[in-house]
Amino acid sequence: MHPAAPNLLATLVPLWAAAPVAAVLMLAVATHAVSIGSSDHPASRKRIRQANGALILLVIPLITAGVSVLDPTANPREWTLVWLAVFALLGIIVTLAVTDVLNTLRLARTARRAMHRRLASPTPASSAAPEPHRER
């Protein structure tokens, strides 16, 4: 038995509307992920954000397929698998976002401790009397 031809009217969003939006989103995410590599952020932050960007690049076409390509009545198995993959990847994306927040807190705590140590330790430059202000 041949599978039924997909009914394009049974999808949520027409492909002609969803595909350009998905393409623009993918271009924006890819540009952002590449630009992170050349930023001056710590390496741990770069790795987390680039991994998150890669996962988002996987999710966008899956969502597009789920809302505009696959007909749930004609292909219920494929449609279900696509949406299970979307939700699983979104769970990983949220987990990476929480990891990024925790990493940012760790980096801030480390920087704050280093600043406190710097301020607490007497240095020759900080113990010297400040120069008087001269107007010019």
Image (cartoon, rainbow, N blue to C red):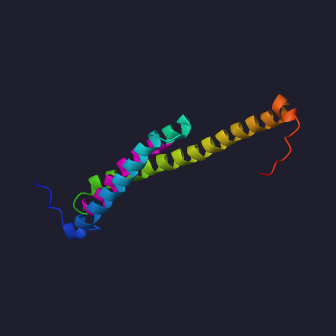
In the picture, measured across the screen, residue 132 lies left or right of residue 60, that is: right
Q: Nearer the viewer, residue 81 or 48?
A: 48
Image quadrant for the N terminus? bottom left
Q: Main secondary structure of the magenta part?
A: helix
Q: Nearer the viewer, residue 38 or 7?
A: 38
| Residue 95 in view (yes/no) | yes
Tell me what residue is drawn at x 46 percent, y 45 percent. Answer: 52
Looking at the image, the residue that sits furthest to the front is 136
Q: Reply above or below: 34 against 25.
A: above
Q: Measuring from the top left, give residue 61's x and y in whole percent.
A: 31, 53
| Residue 72 in view (yes/no) | no
Q: Measuring from the top left, give residue 6's x and y in whole percent.
A: 17, 62
Q: Nearer the viewer, residue 125 or 64?
A: 125
Q: Measuring from the top left, give residue 55's x and y in whole percent.
A: 41, 45
User: Looking at the rendering, which quadrant does residue 41 occupy?
Assistant: top right
Looking at the image, the residue that sits furthest to the bottom is 9
In the picture, measured across the screen, residue 81 lies left or right of residue 123, that is: left
Q: Count numbered badges in the picture.
A: 0
Instruction: Tell me, yes or no, whether the highlighted magenta stretch contains residue 12.
Output: no
Q: Reply above or below: 135 against 74.
A: above
Instruction: Tell me, yes or no, whether the highlighted magenta stretch contains residue 54.
Output: yes
In the picture, measured across the screen, residue 33 lies left or right of residue 23, that is: right
In the picture, measured across the screen, residue 68 lies left or right of residue 88, that is: left
Q: Measuring from the top left, give residue 21's x and y in whole percent.
A: 32, 62
Tell me what residue is drawn at x 33 percent, y 51 percent. Answer: 81
Tell me what residue is drawn at x 77 percent, y 51 percent. Answer: 136
The magenta span reads 49-70
